[in-house]
Image (spheres, rainbow, N blue to C red):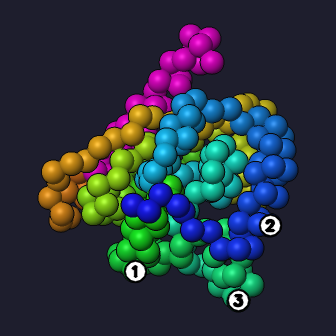
Amino acid sequence: MSGRCRVRPFGRFVLKPLWFYLLAPLFRKAFKVRTLGVEVLKRPGPLIVAPNHRSYIDPPLMNAVSPEPLVFLAKKELFEGRLKNWLFRNMNAIPVDRSRADLEALNEALERLKEGCKVCIFPEGRRAPENGFLRGKPGVGYLAVKSGVPVVPVYIHNSTKILSSDNKKFRIPDEEVWVVFGKPLEFKGLPDNARGYKEVADRVMEEIKALARRLEEAKAGGGT
C-alpha cells in the first residue's frame, strides 16, 4: 500500500476544496445530517466503506460526512457523455456495468486500495426500497478477499427524506438524516472464490442491519 490516494489535478485543486470547505458543511446543515462513529474514517490507510443504498443522494451524503474524499463505484450510466465522464472521473468515481460482474471496475478499485484510498461500494448493488434492504452482492466480498483491507459497514437512515425514487425533487427533511458507521470488519483466511465473496457480503449486510437496530433503540431510548 502506497499510503497516498491519487486524485486528478482538477479534482484535487478545485472540486475537493470547493466541496469539503464550502458545499459539504452547507449540505450537512441544510439536510439535518448527523453521524455516529465517523471517526473510523480518520484511520490511516485504505478501507472499504460499505453503506446501504436507498436514495440517489447517498453518494454525496457519504462524501459530505467523510473527512476525506472517497473513491466511489458508480453505475456506468452516470459517465455517459464526454463532460459527465470527465466530471465523475475527477470526482474519483469508477464506472461499473451493473448488468454483469464487472471485474474491470473491481480491479480498478483494488488498485485504488493499493494506493491507500478509501473505496466506497454499495454492497446491495442498487437502490433498495424505502426502509428496506437487498441481499449483498459479491463485489464487496471480491474487494475484501482480494485486498485483505477491512470493511466498514455503514447504515444510512432517512436519506429518502431528501430525495426519494418516486419524487426527484430535493426536500428539506422533517427528520434527522443519520449516517452510522460500524467497526472495521476483518476477513482473513476466506477462500478466494464465490463462496468467500458471498460470506463477506452476507456478513456486511448483517452488520448494517445491526447498526439500523442500534440506531432505532438509541432513538427510542432518547440516546441520540
Are the two marked residues, 1 and 2, in contact with CB atoms closer than 8 angstroms? no
Q: Residue at x 84, y 44 (%)?
A: 26
Q: Residue at x 26, y 58 (%)?
A: 145
**Residue 202 belongs to the span the image colors magenta:** yes
Q: Residues within 10 Å of mark 3 (few under 14, many from 20)?
A: few
Residue that badge 2 annotates: 14
CA–CA distance between discs 1 and 2?
Answer: 28 Å
Q: Residue at x 45, y 35 (%)?
A: 182
Give the foreground label among 1 and 2.
2
The answer to whether residue 141 is visible is no
CA–CA distance between discs 3 and 2?
Answer: 19 Å
Q: Earlier in the sequence, mark 1 or mark 3?
A: 3
Residue that badge 1 annotates: 104
Residue that badge 3 annotates: 82
Q: Which sits in the foreground, 132 or 172?
A: 172
CA–CA distance between discs 1 and 3?
Answer: 20 Å
Provide the residue span drawn in magenta: 200-224
Q: Earlier in the sequence, mark 3 or mark 2?
A: 2
Vertical side of 172 occupied by 223: above or below:
above
Q: Is residue 221 left or right of residue 29?
A: left
The answer to whether residue 10 is visible is yes
Q: Which sits in the foreground, 85 or 175?
A: 85
Q: Quadrant of the C terminus?
A: top right
Three-letter code, disc 1: Glu
Q: Can you give x and y, in whole percent of width and height, for residue 188 in the image?
A: 21, 48
